[in-house]
Image (cartoon, rainbow, N blue to C red):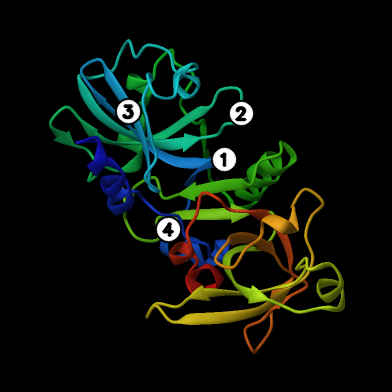
Amino acid sequence: MSEELPTYVQENYSKAVKLELGTWLSKNPLPSLVEAKYDGIRVFLFKSGDKLVLSSKHGGIYTPKSTPQVFSRVPEFLHAPNRMILDGEYVAKEAKGLFLFDVLQVDDRDVRPKPLTERKKILREILKGTGLEVPCTLARSVDKINELRDDEVRAGREGVVVKNPLSSYGQPNSWLKLKKFDTIDVFVTGFVETTEMRKTGLARSWSVAVYDDNGQVVELGNVGSTVESVDPRKIKKGSVIEVRFQEVTRDRKLRAPFVLRIRHDKTPDECTLSQLT
C-alpha cells in the first residue's frame, strides 16, 4: 500500500501558479489568504489509526521507524481523526521541520470540495496544540499582500503563497506563488564550451530549457553565473536548477540569469513554460 502513496500525492497535490498578482486577482478577487512559502519537500501526511506516514511526490516514503529524525519534532495528534490526509512541506533546515497547510480527507469524508476557509477550520482543530499549522493572514489589499511577501523574504523564506479563500482543493489557478524576484526552474540540456572549460574541464556555463504544453523542449538560452554556494561540479546534463533572471527577451531567452540552487527535489518534467505566463 505504501508504494502507492507517492502516486497518490503526484496525482492529487494542489499546484500554485506563477502569474502577475494583478492578473491572478482578476480571477480571484480580494480578500486573499496569504501564507509563507517554505523551501522544502512537498509531502502528504497520511494517518491511519496510530500509524503515520509521510510521502513526497517524488517517491519518498518516511515513517517513524525508517526516518525517526523526520518525526522527532512531530508531537502526538491529540485531536486528530482516526484516518486523515494532510498537505504540507518538510523543511530539514527549519527547527520545526514539518509545516502543514491543508487537509484532503478526514475519516471517510473527502473534504477537498469544501472552501479553503472551511478546510482551514478543520485543519486547525486537527492540529490544535501541535504547532505544525502554517499561519495564514487574510489580506484585503494588494499593498498588504506585498507587505506580507516582503516580510517573509526578509525572514529568509522564498516569499508567499496567495490563495483564494473560497476555492476547493486543487481548483485550477486558485493558488499563486509570489516571490521577491523572478525565478524559474529549468533543466540543463548541455554544456557551453568556454576557454576555462577547455583548460580545466569544468563547465561554468550551461544551456537550459523547459517543456511547453505539448511536451516539446523550449530552449531558454545559456546560464553562466552561480551564487557562491552552488558547486558547478554538481550541475550535470538533466539537472534541475533554479535560475533568477532580469526579464525574458522577445526571442524567449533569459536576460541576466544566474543559478540560485540545484533542485534535487524536482524532475525535468516539472520544468514547464507556464512558469513564464
In space, the residues marked 2 and 4 are separated at their CA atoms by: 31 Å
Query: Which residue is painted at 73% across and 78% down in the image?
Result: 192
Apparent side of residue 192 relative to residue 97 in the rendered image (left or right): right
* Amino acid under disc 4: Asn
Of the residues shown, which amino acid type is indicated by label 3? Val
The disc, 4 or 3, on the residue closer to the chain's N-terminal end is 4
Residue 100 lies left or right of residue 94; in this view the side is left
Instruction: Tell me, for residue 38, which label it has, or none.
Output: 1
Spatial CA span between label 1 and label 2: 9 Å
For residue 182, which quarter of the picture? bottom right
Nearest the viewer among 5 and 107 is 5
Q: How many marks?
A: 4
Residue lying at 25% horizontally and 35% vertically, measured from the top left: 2
- Of tags 4 and 3, the one toward the viewer is 3
Residue nearest the viewer, comparing 270 with 190: 190
The crowd level at tag 2 (other Cα within 10 Å; few <14, some 14-19, many 20+) is: few
Q: What residue would you read off at disc 2?
A: 94
Check disc 3 and report the residue beneath it. Answer: 53
Circle 1: residue type? Tyr
As measured in the structure, the alpha-carbon distance from the residue carrying label 4 to the one carrying label 1 is: 22 Å
Label 4: few (<14), some (14–19) or many (≥20) C-alpha neighbours in 10 Å: many
> Where does the image place residue 199, in percent across and percent down from the top left?
87, 72
Across and down, in percent, residue 180 comes to 69, 54
Could you tell me if residue 168 is visible in this image?
no
Earlier-in-chain disc, 1 versus 3: 1
Label 3 sits on a secondary structure element that is strand
